[in-house]
Amino acid sequence: MGGSGEIERRVQALLARMTLEEKVGQLNQQPLTQDISALEEGVRSGSVGSVVLAYTPFAGREGRRDQAAQRERLQRIALEESRLGIPLLLGRDVLHGHRTVFPIPLAQAAAWDPALAGRAAALAAAEAAQEHVNWTFAPMADVCRDLRWGRVVEGYGEDPYLSGRYAQSAVEGFQKHGGISACAKHFLGYGGSEGGRDYSGVDASQRQLREVYLPPFAQAVAAGVDSVMAAFNDVNGVPVTASRALLTGLLKEELGFDGIVVSDWNAIGQLVGQGAAEDRRDAARLAFLAGVDVDMCSGCYGEHLAGLVREGACPEARLDDAVGRVLRVKLRRREAPPAPPPGRAAAAAAALEAAQKGIVLLKNENGALPLAAGEPVALVGAAARQRRIHLGSWTLDGRARETASIAQELAARRTVYASCCGDPDRARRAAAQAGTAVVVLGEHWDHTGEARGSAGLTLPRRQLDALRAAAGACGRVVAVVCAGRALCLEEVERYADAILCCWHGGSQAARAIVSVLCGDVCPSGRLPVTLPRRPGQIPLYYSQRTAARSIDSYYGTGDIASYLDCPAAPLYPFGWGLSYTAFSYGPVSARREGDGVCLAARVRNTGERAAEEVCQCYIQPRGGGRAHPARLLRGFRRVRLEPGEEREVRFVLGERELSGADETGRARLWPGYAAWIGGNSRTDNGTVFRLEGG
Ligand code: GLC
């Protein structure tokens, strides 16, 4: 990142003037406290360098919301009343919107449209900056293949390539276009927490670290992200917060990251509880030498770092390095003030588009969708009347009262026989009055996010009973699923003719859902995660390695059953999604291009209405003495086609896309490859090719 010449000069000049305590102060981050005057005094004295705008470590669930005036005052104290006038970093979890709430990141990934996510980030940043936020703890770049983990909601799904494209776009949106600092989190491997249990240990080989968890962070660093947050978990027994190999060796030296490494909330203090540090002083020493620059809310740096430097246990050069990183980001933020937001209407329009594009049509039979024009419908399920549900997890500044419910939006479009109380008998009576029953099934907005794991991955029994009751009384049933994660929908699939996966879609979710139900908009979302039939199948993801024998797998049946009590294949695979039209693909061609290959195929809209298809390109390396992932996503493109129109889609894959890590983590090409181009990860439209000397 390196500052410009003038910024670098100012950084060095400040370092030369700073006392040891003032340097340590820049590395000390504190939360909003009840006693705001104590925080203000810390800013005034230079012992607090940044503030996380939250009262508790669970910022995503706080009902209270601090005021913009309070933040403005804190910044003014830093600039005008502290000895050196060094600005504050004021950080907040602006993950998927600020006052205008966008779909949860997982739903944004379901749109397979990183540019749209970049626009969402820029709009969120502009709104947050208006309220004196200059740092967001986003994007979350953690790849996750275990839906039991509550924080799957905050990331971009199970695939490193898709997650990397989104992480890069979000960083550019927040920083370059939105004008606030971004923070790629949580480095590294957090999405692999054992059993989906938050904060738990991660066992990962070098190959897994480099091929699965690292790519999105590498792309965030390449995009110039200002900060990276160290993860709570340990990797192979070493807490990331104390891992010099990961934070300095891999992140700062190998990837060349020269921004701020910030700990997670109290993660330094937690090293004592994890058994890695003898006491808080030892924790401060371990984290500082590992490469953590800023201590989020543990207080260990504030208490011990000056003494550790004086005693020579921590080199002053390392202190100047850490403080220099902080000053560089601060001064650059001051140099490039954010542009004013474009206004609520523009933000709402972008939020509507993001919600519509993230909706995934999983199933559509019996002519269920789109709803016939003007036809009365039954509306079933308590979630149909809910508003806050659509704002999802990690929404700090959105307003439920400004968010419409599905019931409101649908009633504005047609006659509705409603039973939105969840009672199965009343659901049955409502469903009997109409030709189609729309059953809204909802996962509570607070059942995903931090410390929100789920072992069952299913909807509440009462909701499923209402669905079954409606199915018994009505000829056509449409299930609308509003959730923060992919759930196991085997029972929903049994009773519903059509299923819309709508996630927690943000401020405009209800309008988006009704526009798809009524056919104004063609669903075009594709799954960024696999939908298992049952939790017992987890971990289940599309890029699992091919087994030694022909067993039932992700890609279908084999000679041997993987489970005696459940098919091995998912209910719906990665990349899956239907449309109100249909698409067909021609054969895949492969020809050399530069140091790589160009893969191409023609795609055609064979249906009756214009729509967007997400064309996906997968490869499978072959040979080289390795068991390779069954498939790897290496390209995708949204293509809008009129009825009958066809177009060639091309994917040029270079060395970066074709190489993989060997068991030592070293990147290499492989002798041969299979390749596919189609509408989801299980397409069989493929070819094979070799790279000479691979
Ligand atoms: C939390 C989360 C982290 C968040 C931080 C500040 O504990 O782990 O993602 O950014 O604290 O709220």
Image (spheres, helix red, strand yellow):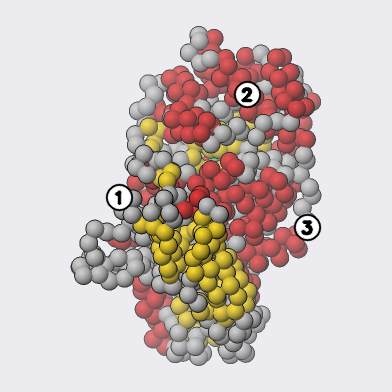
Q: Which mark is residue 343?
A: 3
Q: Residue 186: x and y, percent?
A: 50, 42
228 to 388, vertically: above or below: above
- Asked whether, in this view, residue 82 is left or right of residue 622, the answer is right
SS of the residue at dot 1? loop
For disc 1, the marked residue is: 625
Q: Position of residue 38 (x, y in %)?
A: 64, 26
- Between 20 and 381, the one nearer to me in the picture: 20
Q: CA distance from mark 2 to mark 3?
A: 36 Å
Mark 2 touching mark 1, by CB under 8 A? no
Q: Which residue is mark 2?
A: 323
First reached walking from the N terminus: tag 2 or tag 3: 2
Q: Nearer the viewer, mark 2 or mark 1?
A: 1
Disc 2 versus disc 3: nearer the observer: 2
Mark 3 nearby-residue class (10 Å; few <14, some 14–19, many ≥20): few
Q: Do tag 1 and tag 3 residues touch (Cβ < 8 Å)?
A: no
* Left or right, 250 with reference to 94: left
